């Protein structure tokens, strides 16, 4: 019986180009995700110039929000007072 047992390692086919491409693409995707997570955990400090532009942008957005607040009141339909009879 011991003569019949084949203890050689199984034959594994060479990976194709598509399998290799998929493997390295998955590695690159994982590295990119780790970098994104680290960027959220450790944000970079803002420079003085960026803070000034954001403060002026904030004022501009506040001015744009004011006219939008009036628009829903104009579009509201008057309520019907009587119900339809069947």
Image: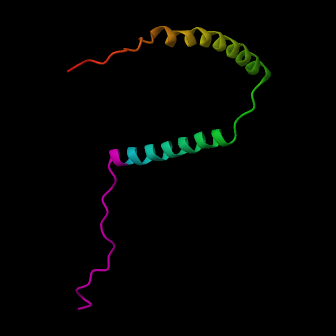
Q: Position of residue 26 (x, y in %)?
A: 45, 46
Tell me which residue sits at (34%, 53%) in the image. Answer: 15
Q: Nearer the viewer, residue 35 or 5?
A: 35
Q: Position of residue 4 (x, y in %)?
A: 22, 86
Q: Over which residues does the magenta segment extend?
A: 1-19
Question: Which image quarter: residue 63?
Answer: top right
Q: Nearer the viewer, residue 55 or 50?
A: 55
- Residue 20 on the magenta segment: no
| Quarter of the image that includes the N terminus | bottom left
Query: Quick check: 68 left or right of 55?
Result: left
Q: Position of residue 54 (x, y in %)?
A: 70, 18
Question: Which image quarter: residue 52?
Answer: top right
| Quarter of the image that includes the C terminus | top left
Tell me which residue sits at (73%, 20%) in the image. Answer: 50
Query: Quick check: 28 left or right of 44?
Result: left
- Residue 3 on the magenta segment: yes
Is the magenta region chiefly helix, strand or loop? loop
Residue 5 vertical placement versus 39 (above, below): below
Tell me which residue sits at (62%, 11%) in the image. Answer: 66
Tell me which residue sits at (66%, 43%) in the image. Answer: 41
Query: Quick check: 21 left or right of 28?
Result: left
Query: Quick check: 80 left or right of 37?
Result: left
Q: How many marks on residues? A: 0
């Amino acid at each position: 019986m011991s003569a019949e047992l084949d203890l050689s390692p199984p034959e594994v086919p060479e990976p194709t180009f598509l399998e290799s491409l998929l493997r390295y693409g998955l590695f690159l995707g994982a590295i990119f995700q780790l970098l994104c997570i680290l960027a959220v955990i450790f944000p970079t400090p803002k420079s003085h110039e960026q803070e000034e532009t954001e403060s002026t942008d904030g004022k501009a957005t506040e001015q744009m929000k004011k006219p939008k607040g009036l628009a829903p009141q104009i579009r509201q339909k008057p309520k019907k007072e009587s119900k339809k009879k069947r």
